[in-house]
Amino acid sequence: MDGREHVRVAVIGSGFGGLGAAVRLRREGITDFVVLERADSVGGTWRDNSYPGCACDVPSHLYSFSFAPNPDWPRTFSGQPAIRAYLEHVADTFGLRPHIRLNSEVRMMRWDADGLRWEVETSAGDLTADVVVSATGPLSDPKMPEIPGLAEFPGKVFHSARWDHDYDLRGKRVAMVGTGASAIQIVPAIAPDVERLTLFQRTPPWVMPRTDRAISTAERWLHRQLPFTRAARRGLLWGIRELQVSAFTKRPNQLGLIESLAKANMARSIKDPELRAKLTPSYRIGCKRILLSSDYYPALARPNVDLVASGLTEIRGSTLVAADGTETEVDAIVFGTGFHVTDMPIADRVVGAGGETLADAWKDGMHALRGATAAGFPNWMTIIGPNTGLGNSSMILMIESQLNYMADYLRQLDVLGGRAALAARPSAVGAWNRHVQERMKRTVWNTGGCTSWYLDANGRNTTVWPGTTGEFRRETRSVDLAEYEVVRVRHRERERERVAAEAAVPAPAAPPATAPATVEEGAA
């Protein structure tokens, strides 16, 4: 209407969420969409995280789309290169390349209340869209701590999600800051090559053995020739994890046995009682994400690896100072300090119907209806939104559930007809989140005695889903129009646009072009 490209749907991000959304749009018969990606290739977090030892802690046959099974996974827990190759394969197989706009970082999204569309500014040009699907993911923007003296450190510094492959760590004195999922993979991978590795640990993780192995040629052949065997394997992996959920969400005290197994795993490799004490968590297992590794503890027992059981607080030149006063000279610092999860940077770039950014709307904590839509932001959805994370299973299951919801959302817009938008009712968003937070009270994530990245600055768990993946799929099977307001352009505005289009001349001055949208109470 104003010279800018217009699409029905703009998808932000090309990781699992974005590519999954693109596939689902095509399967729904929708081809008028674009996938906006800030980088020069697809893959999301599996493109960005390429550090040594990077791999998934969910079995490969469960960590893949149900509509794009892969019979040729190389390992039971595949590494980053295999997962990234899988995502490239999905983009090719489902014909997504023509829709993908690489090097197109979204700078701002603004809701145009008069046109009932989103105005999207990107680094490669501007466009408009009827619907925006944000699939930027919670693990996309690394979090770097603010440490006095860091800017003056003379050596090399980088985050695990921005690994500098041009810098050779061999023979260097290296500090690893953090003990999360990335760190426990990096430490064993680099320990044999560095001169000395010092691990700065604020809180020890619970670590269970990772029963990883190569998938045999016979297994792969069987999965290719008899697809039901592949489906059965996936179903078994899913079912086991569904049965575990109640211990996390309703009966955390049942996790004591798992703690015993984790301690036994540690004892097999860590013989020093003092080191073992430093590595033993004081919180209930599951409160933080349970990590899987069979080589983390053996790496910590190496003579060239030191554990500082205290957080890094200051840097003086090339000397790192811990909270307990320990000083360590290093040549390089690797930060495994996580991501902006509860304060996603994309929220600063979304301006809703009232002129408020999503970050402002969520300043007291993220909240969205069924993890997908936010009050005040019509026709805007997020994939892997608030309270859709998992502590023990595959996020691909949750993504596919949200894709079901997205598909029905678009169907409902079609049924409504004309130019319309759906705006989540504040009352519905509030009711949903009260329900989620009430269920959260009994979970191990809230009662386990830890401080984790699941919690926001107010101590509220806005990250994890307090139920099974099956429950979430039922909750997101379809859109309930009673939870939304139907927003339309006034009839006179529509008529003015029709006449203007037919006459191919500018629309008359009256009525004003800024005629406000109207709201229909309830479903149309």
Image (tube, rainbow, N blue to C red):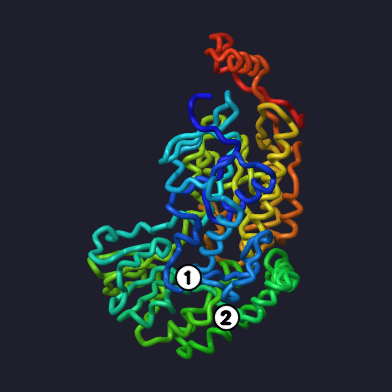
Q: Position of residue 235 (x, y in %)?
A: 73, 69
- Crowding around mark 2 (Cα neighbors within 10 Å: few <14, some 14 to 19, many 20+) is few
Is the Cβ of the residue at disc 2 closer than 8 Å to that at disc 1? no
Please say if 44 is above or below 230: above
Disc 1 is placed on an element classified as: loop
Q: What residue is rendered at 46% in x and 38% in y? A: 108
Q: Position of residue 446 (x, y in %)?
A: 62, 61
Q: Position of residue 513 (x, y in %)?
A: 55, 16
Q: Is residue 306 visible?
A: yes
- Crowding around mark 1 (Cα neighbors within 10 Å: few <14, some 14 to 19, many 20+) is many
Residue nearest the viewer, comparing 16 with 207: 16
Q: Is residue 447 visible?
A: no
Q: Count of labels shown?
A: 2
Given the image, on which type of amino acid does mark 1 rest? Cys
For marks 2 and 1, the one nearer the N-term is 1
Marks 2 and 1 sit apart, C-alpha to C-alpha, by 16 Å
Residue nearest the viewer, comparing 131 with 81: 81
Return the mark for residue 91.
Answer: none
Quick one: quadrant of the C terminus? top right
Q: Which residue is mark 1?
A: 54
Q: Which residue is mark 2?
A: 214
Given the image, on which type of amino acid does mark 2 rest? Ala
Q: What residue is rendered at 65% in x and 61% in y? A: 68
Left or right, residue 445 beside residue 275:
right
Left or right, residue 24 beside residue 101:
right
Q: Position of residue 100 (x, y in %)?
A: 51, 47
Left or right, residue 238 beside residue 178:
right
Please say if 205 is above or below 98: below
Disc 2 is placed on an element classified as: loop
